[in-house]
Image (cartoon, rainbow, N blue to C red):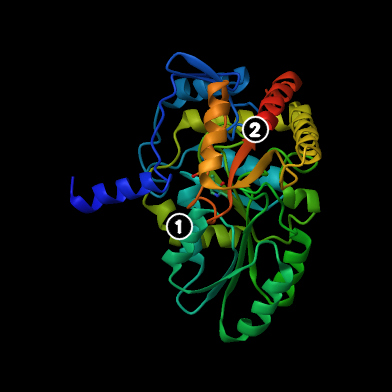
Amino acid sequence: MDNYYKLFLEKQKELNLLRSLKTIEQSKDNIITINNRPYIDFSSNDYLSLADHVYVKQKSIEFTEKYGTSASASRLLSGNFEYHVLLEDKIAQLKKKETGLIFGSGFIANTSVIPALMQRHDVIFADKLVHASIIDGIILAACKFYRYDHNDMTHLEMLLKKERSHYKNVLIITESVFSMDGDIAPVDQLVELKKKYNALLYIDEAHATGIFGQTGAGIVEQYGLSEEVDIIMGTFGKALGSYGAYLTLADDLKQYLINRARGFIFSTSLPPGVIGACLAAIELLEKEPERRAQLLQKSNDLRIKLKNAGLEVTGESQIIPVLLHDTAKVIEVSRKMLEAGFYILPIRPPTVREGMARIRLSIVYNHSAETLNKMLELLLKTV
Ligand SMILES: *Cc1c(COP(=O)(O)O)cnc(C)c1O
């Protein structure tokens, strides 16, 4: 290997930042097996425990039987099937938007839609903690961009006031539930600012879809502001237990993106088995609403217990970060939790800022009260 790459790896190791892959043999009921050893998984985004749900699997198999294993082309060629259209209708209905547009993944969606929407003379305002795929989308847009302090609407308005008039099109972009902090964006204030400064508002609901809101549509639904948010984006790979991503939006914007978003135009559309699973998961949001209710209840209980024990915990969702700040400490705590059979991984730079290392507990529907108590007991002894 070239010297530069080797040196990079050595440096990462020294800094406790080296990452490597672990191979999982099986995942069943949110228990994963590695080297024949079971671990209770606290790292997955399968929040509603749907990835192994009988009905989801059955519908995926049904679609594969009926339509085959691949869509075999991009949508604009011969890869636009009725099942794609059906899923776009269903997700739009759930999100209470005019229409939907599906993508290969959330990463593809963000990195192709943002540069399609914003050109060189435009400007983007993004929360400081947005996901890497949003950052990459902004970089590809090659327009001016500003990052406002996390969930700080005063800072965002200050920037808008100062910069708005210099640009034609303006995009405000944020997540609704933040992936590493588990906290929630003030959608009502974002909508006010978007109106006041004539901007487009784009909200990534990757970690909120399926969990928040009356029908499980997400945080935007919880605020009752679906109509006001121009683009509600999310993925099928997290709480919906499948793969792929979507935007829900107005039809004219959709037609524009079909003509402009490169990750839509130049990529094979999602395979039938995946679409079947997505459709089944959306159905289950309606049929089994107790999944999201119980998940949030459990998560809130655990967060309160962690706080009461004196730990630094943030957020209001099923993602519970425990801030330990020091990278070496986080690695040590993670190691001990792994030893005891809890799959809890260290979250460290560059995923989070320097000095903000943490363990991140990702709570899922299948975690029993007993499991959560055992995990808590050990964690309190370990930190
Ligand atoms: C996971 C995630 C994505 C990427 O979605 P994938 O479908 O996994 O590619 C985008 N945005 C946010 C906020 C995410 O957490």
Q: Position of residue 65 (x, y in %)?
A: 46, 20
Provide residue 334's location: percent of width, then percent of height. Answer: 55, 33
Q: Quadrant of residue 195?
A: bottom right
| Nearer to the camera, 32 or 339 | 339
Q: Is residue 209 visible?
A: no
Quadrant of the drawing holding the N terminus: top left
x then y, percent, for residue 85: 55, 42
Q: Is residue 90 above or below residue 204?
A: above
Q: Residue at x 49, y 15 (%)?
A: 37
State which tag comes first along the sequence, 1 or 2.
2
Residue located at (74% from left, 28% from top) = 291
Which residue occupies the extreme left position in the image?
A: 2
Q: Residue at the location (79% across, 48% down)? A: 222
Quadrant occupied by the C terminus: top right
Task: From the image, tell me which residue sits under label 2.
Answer: 47
Q: Does residue 299 lie above or below 113 as drawn?
A: above
Q: Residue furthest top?
A: 36
The disc labelled 1 sits on which kind of residue?
Ser
Q: Secondary structure at mark 2?
A: loop
Crowding at mark 2 (Cα within 10 Å: few <14, some 14-19, many 20+): many
From the viewer's perspective, tell me whether residue 161 is left or right of residue 358: right
* Residue for badge 1: 112
Q: CA distance from mark 1 to mark 2?
A: 26 Å
- Answer whether residue 71 is visible to the viewer in this image: yes
Question: Would you place residue 125 above or below residue 265 in this image?
Answer: below
Does any atom of ligand 1 lie closer than 8 Å to the CB of label 2?
A: no
Label 1 element class: helix
Kindly identify the amino acid type of the residue bearing the numbered disc 2: Tyr
Seen from the viewer's position, the closer of residues 286 and 196 is 196
Image quadrant where residue 341 sits: top right
